[in-house]
Amino acid sequence: MKNLQWKSIFIYITLVLLTLVLVFFSLRMGAAPLSENWLSEIFQYGKALVTGIPQSNAAAQTTWAIVMDIRLPRIIAALLAGGGLALAGTLMQGLFQNPLAGPEILGISSGASLGAVVAIVTGLAASSFTAVPLSAVLGALGSASFIYLISRSQTGTVLLTVVLAGLALSGFLGGVISTFLLLARPYEINQFIFWTMGGLEGRLWSHISYPLPLIIIGTLGALASTRKLDLFALGEEAAHSSGVGVERSKILMLGSATLLTAGAIAMAGPIGFIGLITPHFFRLLLGPGHRILLPAAALGGGLFLLGADLLGRTLIAPFEIKAGVITALLGSPYFLFLVIRRRGRS
């Protein structure tokens, strides 16, 4: 037990240090070059803002605008979206007792995509930059709510029905999305395809502010589920006999995963594989205890997406590769490894 505690502390410290390193390079690197004294210029301009003394240094003002208004919101969005997806994946894998489970089980991604394509085709996206992410959130919440309602029975929520209903709804919504795209103009189709790749370019503080409550509420719900997830690993009957309200716990976990995924999609678009790979990777390192696993997965998910975004910005600079493309290229081989490893098991 003591060895596990020291191991978890070491992993936490390593994750924090790696995140700080990536944050530094993400602030430093980009299409707009910064001077060698960029940290000093930011400090000078920030000091001028606090003291109210006018800042006449144009270079410092430019550096402040690039770092604080363009790059820092992108970094925060990556950390929040990646951490949210990893937490949602951890909840799904713990609830369904399957390391191949992910946020996509609830049809959230398909619902979000439908909301986005409706916003684009109806012209809402052209009138407001918040239309697509807000419509995606509504679509995600609507699809998850529908899955939950049809999965209810007199004895409670049937998890197998959740999986089957999620698959069926995803297929149906895919057909609806294709119908909308048939009626769309070419530039609208391009806009939708570009959004479905998932990415963090152009993120401002306003892109973070309105999905942030979803991430916060979902994170609190996930952290409140640690003991329940550990008991669910023994089976629903064992959890019930331990005094856990099984149905309330399912609602809490499914609702938290939905809010986390919806908030992450609103910030970064439909990023794949983070919610699948990150929890499984840290479960191998730290074991199944969710009190330790959930924070590590959140840190690791944010680190994964931030690293993918930095890699996409620097590989073929000044051109960018979408972060969702990077996560897919890195995550697909690991997912195939999981499938091959678990073949033959029920």
Image (cartoon, rainbow, N blue to C red):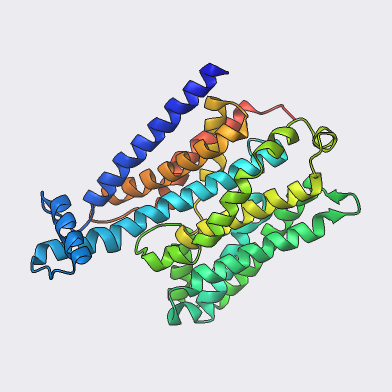
Residue for point 47% across, 21% down: 6
- 117 lies left or right of 50: right
Looking at the image, is 24 positioned above or below residue 127? above
Q: What is the residue that sits farthest to the front in this orientation?
A: 51
Quarter of the view holding residue 234:
top right
Looking at the image, is 107 positioned above or below residue 305? below
Q: Position of residue 203 (x, y in %)?
A: 37, 63
Residue 86 appearing in the image: yes
- 160 lies left or right of 216: right
Q: What is the residue that sits farthest to the right in this orientation?
A: 154
Quarter of the figure that contains the C terminus: top right
Q: Position of residue 303 (x, y in %)?
A: 41, 42
Q: Report the front residue among 337 and 149.
A: 149
Looking at the image, is 54 positioned above or below residue 96? below
Q: Position of residue 62 (x, y in %)?
A: 16, 64
Quarter of the view holding residue 224:
top right
Q: How many marks?
A: 0
Quarter of the figure that contains the N terminus: top right
Residue for point 42% across, 66% down: 207
Residue 315 appearing in the image: no
Looking at the image, is 317 positioned above or below residue 133? above
- 97 lies left or right of 40: right
Residue for point 67% across, 50% down: 105
Q: Position of residue 275 (x, y in %)?
A: 55, 44
Q: Report the front residue among 193 and 92.
A: 92
